Image: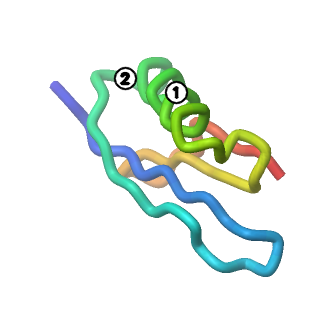
Amino acid sequence: MSKTYKLTVFEPSGEKLLDEAFTAEHDKQAKEIGERLLKEKNYSEFTHRCTSSAGKLVLFHI
C-alpha cells in the first residue's frame, strides 16, 4: 500500500522553493525518491525535509 510523502525545500530566508507530494511504498523508498528529486532539481544543499502523511520525518538537512 502506497503512502503519501511531502518534500519541502527552503531558502535561507524561509521562503519555500519546493513543496511537492509523491507516493512511496515505505519510508526507505520515500527517502530514496526524495534524495533523487533533490538532485534532479539541484536542491540537495538547501534546507529540506521529507515527511510522511503521519508526520514522520524521513529526510532532513539544514
Mark 1 in CB contact with mark 2 (< 8 angstroms): no
Residue type, numbered disc 2: His
Q: Where does the image place residue 41, in percent across and percent down from the top left? A: 54, 43
User: What numbered label is drawn on residue 59?
Assistant: none
**Sequence-wise first label, 1 or 2:** 2
- Colour mapping: rainbow
At 65% from the left and 47% from the top, the residue drawn is 43
Q: Which picture quadrant has residue 29?
A: top left
Residue type, numbered disc 1: Arg
Give whichever of 5, 36 is nearer the camera. 36
Q: Where does the image place residue 59, in percent across and percent down from the top left? A: 63, 38
Give whichever of 62, 39 is nearer the camera. 39
Q: Residues within 10 Å of mark 2 (few under 14, many from 20)?
A: some
> SS of the residue at dot 1?
helix
User: What numbered label is drawn on residue 26?
Assistant: 2
At 70% from the left and 40% from the top, the residue drawn is 44
Q: Where does the image place residue 61, in percent across and percent down from the top left? A: 77, 45
The residue that disc 1 covers is 36
Q: Residue furthest left?
A: 1
Query: Does residue 58 appear to the left or right of 15 in the view shown?
Result: left
Q: Residues within 10 Å of mark 1 (few under 14, many from 20)?
A: few
Q: Where does the image place residue 34, in percent across and percent down from the top left? A: 50, 34
At 64% from the left and 42% from the top, the residue drawn is 42
Query: Does residue 57 appear to the left or right of 48 in the view shown?
Result: left
Q: Nearer the viewer, mark 1 or mark 2?
A: 1
Give whichever of 43, 33 is nearer the camera. 43
